[in-house]
Image (spheres, rainbow, N blue to C red):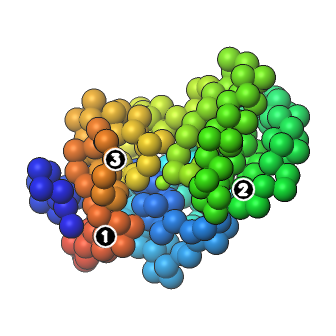
Amino acid sequence: MNGPTHPGPRECPGWAQDWALFLDIDGTLLDLAPEPQAVRIPPDLRSQLEVLAQGLGGALALVSGRPLSDIDRFFPGGFDAAGTHGVQWRLGGIATDPGPAVADALTGIAEWLRAGTQGMSGVLLERKPHAVALHYRLAPQREAQIQSLAARAAQTLGPDFRLQAGKLVVEILPVAAGKGAAIERFMGRPPYAGRTPVFVGDDRTDEDGFAVVNRLGGRSVRVGEGGETQARWRLASPDAVRDWLAGLVASLPRDGV
Ligand SMILES: [Mg+2]
């Protein structure tokens, strides 16, 4: 299941309790679905994440393009998390976000995009608190049209916002958003500081997270085959990620330490 040139994470020496584990959600922990709200959450996954977080001294965070509200609905319990590609951020139950100015700035453009995509079947506008996403998984033939609409929208908003393309989705985000910055922010604070960062993600939007983790001497893991990546390890699929996590859980000490 691993690429020929990289050892699999199972072969990584000395994984265990000095890791700080950062996990993307869609396409990494969960299989991608035709629409974002149609993902299936495997029943044991939340409790496995909780056990792993405990085993890592609390150093486990979900790092997703999803808003925190989605993350909490899928994985209740207040996990540390970076939502909306790091625009929202939560550590030890305390969440921060850029506040209503960003949300307000996006309102007009979201309406403009909604009008511009009206009648395009298979195109889904997702209004997040601090971002707007256009999903076209069900209408991939519309890619060029959607990208150009989104580019015009971002241009209209000016330099405080940027475009970010993912797998059959394009988003307009605050310019400072990014998973790499979010991971770095965690790594500067306990219980993450001093640990070895490990980031597992599947998409172009995860590449700056891989770059940060590589720079910090950690382990970067790209999920899925193909695609240029800076990640140094690979897992074949979300299924493989879940097997790998189950293996980590099974290898934790059983004596309550
Ligand atoms: Mg993903």
Q: Nearer the viewer, residue 19 or 115?
A: 115
Disc 1 target residue: 240
Q: In this view, does 82 lie above or below 49?
A: above
Find numbered disc 3 in the image and state the secondary structure of the residue it sits on.
Answer: loop
Percent across and percent down for residue 31 are 48, 69
Q: Is residue 222 above or below residue 11?
A: above
Instruction: Determine whether, in the image, residue 182 is placed left or right of residue 193.
Output: right
Q: Which of 46 and 171 is in front in this view?
A: 171
Find numbered disc 1 in the image and state the secondary structure of the residue it sits on.
Answer: helix
Of marks 1 and 2, which one's residue comes earlier in the chain? 2
Percent across and percent down for residue 250 are 25, 76
Find numbered disc 2 in the image and state the secondary structure of the residue it sits on.
Answer: loop
C-alpha distance separating marks 1 and 3: 18 Å
Q: In which quarter of the image is residue 158?
A: top right
Residue at 30% x, 74% y: name it: 243
C-alpha distance separating marks 2 and 3: 24 Å
Disc 2 target residue: 123
Q: Which of marks 1 and 2 is in front?
A: 2
Q: Residue furthest bottom?
A: 43
Of marks 1 and 3, which one's residue comes earlier in the chain? 3
Disc 3 target residue: 227
Residue at 86% x, 38% y: name it: 112
Percent across and percent down for residue 76 are 61, 68
Instruction: Determine whether, in the image, residue 185 is placed left or right of residue 108.
Output: left
Tell me if the residue at label 3 has its CB under 8 Å from ligand 1: no
